[in-house]
Image (spheres, rainbow, N blue to C red):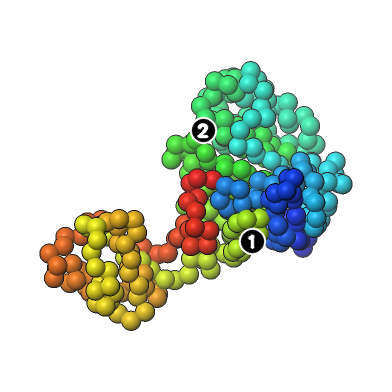
Amino acid sequence: MNNVAAVEITSLVKRYGDKTAVNGLTLTARRGEVTALLGPNGAGKTSTIEICEGYRKADGGAVRVLGLDPAADGARLRPRVGVMLQSGGIPPAVPAREYLTLLSKFHAHSLDPDGLLETVGLSGSARTPYKRLSGGQQQRLSLAAAVIGRPELVFLDEPTAGMDPQARHATWDIVTGLREAGVSVILTTHFMEEAERLADHVVIIDNGAVVADAAPSELTGSDGQLRFQAESGLDTDSLLAALPAGAAAKESPSGHYVVETQGAVDPATLAAVTAWCAERGVLPSSLRVESRTLEDVFLELTGKDLRDT
């Protein structure tokens, strides 16, 4: 495999007037991997992606996409890169099959439009104009449009927005298939399950800079959590005193309690929590043991709800 990175960004800066949207951002997305770029609203991820796609020019730093400068080498890059927009870009009145057929003519070795429609689950809507497709169907057509030219690199912006669970899982299978075929994928998403399931590499940015850069498993670690619901205002200090050394306890939000442990939650910790509840006549509901999630990491690093992005 070519050792050139799919995307390499060094000290990237982008300003809009007095506002600095991207502030010295540096990251590398490796070939043949899915890289998830996450960040709250205003973090700079959209500007970063648009610079990589050649739609905006940087004010500082360097960007290389498949070894080329997207600003200076756009004509050479475009046949090698697929871009899936979250919305827009497709003529409202054009039928799905007609649109893909048109796109296929711009590529020397395109995928078969009918086969691609079947892959994304749109065979039954081949003659339906774009404007009459559901939101999820429009997303799937946008995905098909992004990959029809057999790109080496695909940018996917919120690829499953508006999809029902079945369509979302089907799209995940398509993205997994792209990676297995050696295609590099840059993914932006606000679904943490999606990022954890698909990404080999996660980059979290905030205020225009990288705040985390690692594999999902490295970010989440092996620490465990025990969660339960009960009446609000319970004494978490006494709960902490009842727990094994190294554990932590908090109420967040009101009536929702979290016990965090170093390593996986063990039977002793579970017994300590249930005994503490029993001593106080508290019946916990929704008691469950979980691993630390990517969303937990995101909130710790940015202090913002990803679903507001």
Dot 2 falls on a residue whose secondary structure is helix
The kind of residue tagged 2 is Gly
Identify the residue at horizontal 53%, vertical 58% (top origin): 302
The circle drawn on residue 247 is none
The kind of residue tagged 1 is Val
Quarter-wise, where is residue 60 in the image? bottom right
Please say if 37 is above or below 97. below
Q: Is residue 162 left or right of residue 101?
A: left
Dot 1 falls on a residue whose secondary structure is strand
The percent coordinates of residue 159 (x first, y second) are 57, 41
* Residue where numbered disc 1 is placed: 210
Count of marks overlaid on the render: 2
Image quadrant occupied by the C terminus = top right
Nearer the observer, disc 1 or disc 2?
A: 1
First reached walking from the N terminus: tag 1 or tag 2: 2
Identify the residue at horizontal 73%, vertical 31% (top origin): 104
| Residue projecting furthest to the bottom | 245
The percent coordinates of residue 243 (x first, y second) are 28, 76
Please say if 118 is above or below 47. above
* Residue where numbered disc 2 is placed: 136
Frontmost residue, 162 versus 277:
277
Q: Is residue 268 left or right of residue 42?
A: left
Image quadrant occupied by the N terminus = bottom right
Quarter-wise, where is residue 16 in the image? top right
Q: CA distance from mark 1 to mark 2?
A: 31 Å
Residue 95 appears anywhere in the view: no
Frontmost residue, 209 versus 260:
209
The percent coordinates of residue 28 (x first, y second) are 70, 61
Could you classify mark 1 by the number of other residues whose Cα lies within 10 Å: few (under 14), some (14-19), or many (20 or more)?
Answer: many
Q: Is residue 227 left or right of residue 58?
A: left
| Residue projecting furthest to the right | 72
